[in-house]
Image (tube, rainbow, N blue to C red):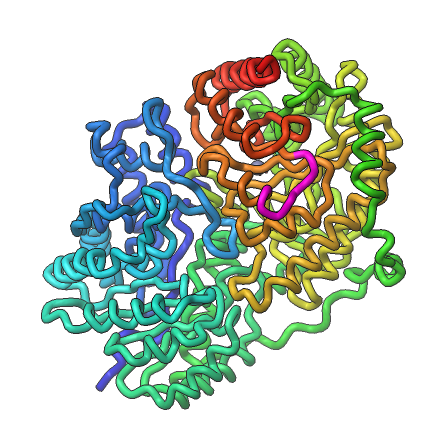
Amino acid sequence: MTNSFGRSTVLGYPRIGANRELKRAVEAYWAATIDADELDRTAAALRARVWQTLRDARLDAIPSNTFSYYDHVLDTAVAVGAVPDRFRRLGLSELDTYFAMARGVDAEPALELTKWFATNYHYLVPEIGPDTAFAANPAKPLQEYAEASALGIATRPVLVGPATLLLLAKPDRPGFDPFDRLDDVVDAYADLLAALAEAGVAWVQLDEPAYAADRTAAQIDGLRAAYARLAELAHRPRVFVATYFGELGDALPALVDTPVEAIGLDLVAGPGNLRRLAGAGPLRGTTVVAGLVDGHNVWRTDLRAAIATGAIVTGLADHVAVSTSCSLLHVPVDLSAETRLDPQLVARLSFARQKVDEVVLVGQALRDGTAQLPPPLPDPPAAWRDEQVRARLAAVTPADRRRGPYADRAAAQQARLRLPALPTTTIGSFPQTAALRKARAAVRAGTLDGPGYAGRMRAEVEHVIRLQEDLGLDVLVHGEPERNDMVQYFGEQLAGFAATEHGWVQSYGTRCVRPPIIYGDVRRAAPMTVEWAAFAQSLTARPVKGMLTGPVTILAWSFVRTDQPLADTADQVALALRDECRDLEAAGIAVIQVDEPALRELLPLRAAEQKAYLDWAVGAFRLATSGVADGTQIHTHLCYSEFGDVITAIDALDADVTSIEASRSKMEVLDDLAAIGFGRGVGPGVWDIHSPRVPPLDEVVEALRRAVAAVPARRLWVNPDCGLKTRAYPEVEASLRHLVAAAAEIREG
Ligand code: GLN
Ligand code: ZN
């Protein structure tokens, strides 16, 4: 029998376009400057380009339905009819209902947004309850399949699998477990599969990455039962269950037990899958799709090692295909667009387009050994090592990661800052206006010089300071106008980091980031933020927060080196930040915020590995922040996730004040903090800044009432969920007025 799956595939490909065309089109649609038809035409052209690219690269199994207007989890929720009534009731078109779920409208807040496993991608959390009326809605996968077929390309539609969809969902009422609806949702998948088969689809890919995390026996049984049932269908495509982001553990034999035709294993993030596969006995008839090319980092694949691993897999199964370890969604589109990177670095990199070539090469080598492999890489240049930084790190002692007792710090800080109860503040950034982005573009184009740019940024800082004074905020920020991005900004100034020109990666919806690449030892050449903070402080008598990005977040939002432990890279970054904190303090800055929104993001999926991670993550934060005096107030900020399983680590950061996303989840995090006896300052977000909606005053008051019930007022801060860079001034002003007024109302009792 021939292997009908094909020899080489990718689990997904970037959908935003090499020049972020999709971002522009979707935002134009939101701004009503283009209509739905034009949006669809742009999207269709982008999809066609991806399929043609993959075909021309000689990939022989090509995915579809990996495109999305906003998020692929939301797409699958829609495909099984999991549209909450609160959105159906709006009576909008299908497309606008979709965007309402993603972004909220005045009348309805959006679905919750949270991290996609250990990546910097965020998905919309499906809301599922006992009454969710699942029903197959195959329109989108069918349309994409038909579009590709019209180009002569037979594709494999991709959906999030039923078990993972429910495991990622949140209940629409307390006390309900969405996984209880597995049988019902599988009915909808059965109908979807039937519709796809009807249209001629030969293979479908169902993604079950949730099984790379710890799962209960019941959840593993659910997985087995779901696929056993789907496999029984009389009329269906062949089923490829893709897993990624780690080792499957007991879910692997469970999947092997089912009659699905193909199983995908991540052999990069989950090398132990190989041993487990060997234990499951030789697979007869089932295709193993071996994830040998890292879809989550930018380093060139060691082709010889990948081929060797592939050869082992070939010994364990009749049919083997080569693939990326996960979707290529997480890496930039094309290395050949980068013209300014050091050639020594370029030689070591591979972006999505290049990774496709690597997959094809490994597939060829495994098939008939004819692949022409490029020569192996020489050792990295000596200049990438910094002996001084290494010596300094070796000399770090536990005392360098410790501050004085909190009570002493709190007293010294209050004596210095004299803040009212429930102090109001923001998280750092103010709107990144078109004028600011234009100024940066002008610098890149050479039409605006350094002093001209700095002058514009200073004018913006002054505007932001005056606005905050006018609004009556207590602790001000400079607004971060000079920062293109909170990690990239530091990456551009630290040795050991490289910035790309076009290396955009989707973060959520139309938001893209350009993660720097950490390739060598990290060193701070000069102060990075002090001039801006000091200038802002010179404009006002109120305290201005110095604003830094923490070591874990810098790592999480960069592409990291894989030749040394992450802990060592984090500590190198921490030393640079420690020097920055001291310089800010010396410049008269009394409050320094070190953002760690990505603390939860790097948390290993398996509980057994989590403690070691949290130890080094907390240690790096404390190394960065423990060099300052008691009277300097250290803030941290966390967002984008459920914090339940990192709550003790948040406490261990030992920040004087922690601001934390809370509004979409209705302050739940405060109960978690109270449960562990968290005893320092906390600012639960009272305004969901991921949506353009202005929270009404009584809603903010209500959120604060809930907060005051959970946290003593003297430790409570009042702030939005996150920075305001993605918002526009009118909604920012209106919302902050409500925030300040709500704080005043609660203070007065
Ligand atoms: N200080 C950053 C800002 O305000 C924090 C952003 C974040 O948490 N993602 O934009
Ligand atoms: Zn945030």
Closer to the camera in the image, 386 or 170: 170
Q: Residue furthest top?
A: 470
Q: Any magenta on residue 547?
A: no
Q: Position of residue 543 (x, y in %)?
A: 76, 21
* Residue located at (55% from left, 45% from top): 672
Q: Position of residue 103 (x, y in %)?
A: 38, 33
Question: Is 32 placed above or below 361 here?
Answer: above
* Quarter occupied by residue 96: top left
Q: Position of residue 379 (x, y in %)?
A: 72, 72
* Residue located at (21% from left, 71% from top): 238
Q: Any magenta on residue 678?
A: yes
Closer to the camera in the image, 447 or 335: 335
* Residue located at (42% from left, 73% from top): 265
Q: Left or right: 742 with respect to 466?
A: left
Q: Left or right: 476 with respect to 237?
A: right
Q: Left or right: 465 with respect to 688?
A: right
Q: Quadrant of ligand 2?
A: top right
Closer to the camera in the image, 130 or 395: 130
Q: Which residues are magenta?
A: 674-681
For the question of whether residue 153 can be seen, the reply is no
* Main secondary structure found in the magenta portion: loop
Q: Position of residue 712 (x, y in %)?
A: 63, 30
